[in-house]
Amino acid sequence: MTIALNASFSELDAVNEMLLAIRERPVASLDAIDVLSEAGQALDLLRKESLALQARGKYFNTSIETLDQDVSNTLPLAVNVISVRSTDQTKNYMAYEGYLYDATNNTSTFTSSVELEIVRFMDFDSIPIEYRFYIAAMAGRKFEQRMRGTPEANQFTQESIVQRRAICMALDSRQNRLNMLDSYRPGSIVDTRNNPFTGLVK
């Protein structure tokens, strides 16, 4: 399916593209929609596809951060944190019930700050537009198949998904090259703590 390139391609736009694929009328808003309606099911699929992709850790939602313990010597994590990994490879940390957990020592209390690689779930409208189109195509294909009750998808074809994935891979490669160039600059830090997308979540 050809989706018009639009810099303001939003979550609402993506849901409406999915609805049009099954010849349903678009909706004016995603607020208070029935979760069992076609729009509700489209939104659910879109967000699940977004989470599945972002959980892999992409350049736009991964950052190196130093966390400080609170008054209880625990390290609370933001609600949008998907996963964490210590920058110290001798440490085995994980996210557990909203806090950082030391799986090696079986404790959630810490005596000092911890540097982590953090993968966050970002709002659909905040991620790079190339990824928005890709996620919408993947979710749209599943939605069309579900609603039509057939493995075929006339609007969101496998070819269109492959094309969109290739665009995202090229974007990733470009970002990796930029990071490699940064690593040769004096005083540079190769991580995403200055990433303009980091933290842009609901």
Image: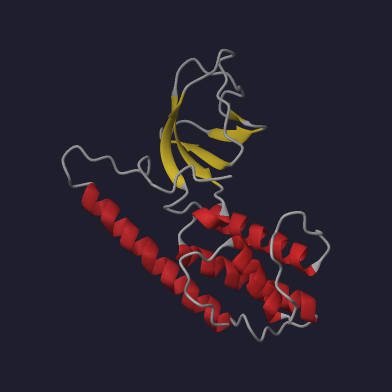
Which colour scheme appears in the figure? secondary structure
Q: Is residue 144 above or below residue 61?
A: below
Q: Residue furthest top?
A: 71
Q: Is residue 61 left or right of residue 183?
A: right
Above or below residue 156? Residue 138 is: above
Q: Nearer the viewer, residue 141 or 199?
A: 199
Q: Quadrant of the C terminus?
A: top right
Query: Closest to the observer: 89 or 173?
Result: 173
Quadrant of the image occupied by residue 74: top right
In percent of width and height, residue 14 lies at 61, 68
Query: What residue sits 38% from the left and 64% below the top?
Result: 171
Extreme left residue here? Answer: 186
In the rendered view of the protein, which quadrant contains the N terminus? bottom right
Q: Nearer the viewer, residue 37 or 136?
A: 37
Residue 129's place in the image compared with 67, above or below, is: below
Asked if residue 102 shows in the view, the reply is no
Q: Give the image quarter of residue 16.
A: bottom right
Seen at 61% across and 24% down, the residue is: 106
Residue under the point 52% across and 33% down: 92
The x and y percentages for residue 47 are 65, 58
Coordinates of residue 41 in the picture (x, y in percent): 76, 64
Q: Seen in the image, is 153 located left or right of residue 103?
A: right
Question: How many numbered marks does the figure carry?
Answer: 0
Residue 134: image x %, image y %? 53, 69
Q: Can the viewer see residue 58 in this picture?
A: yes
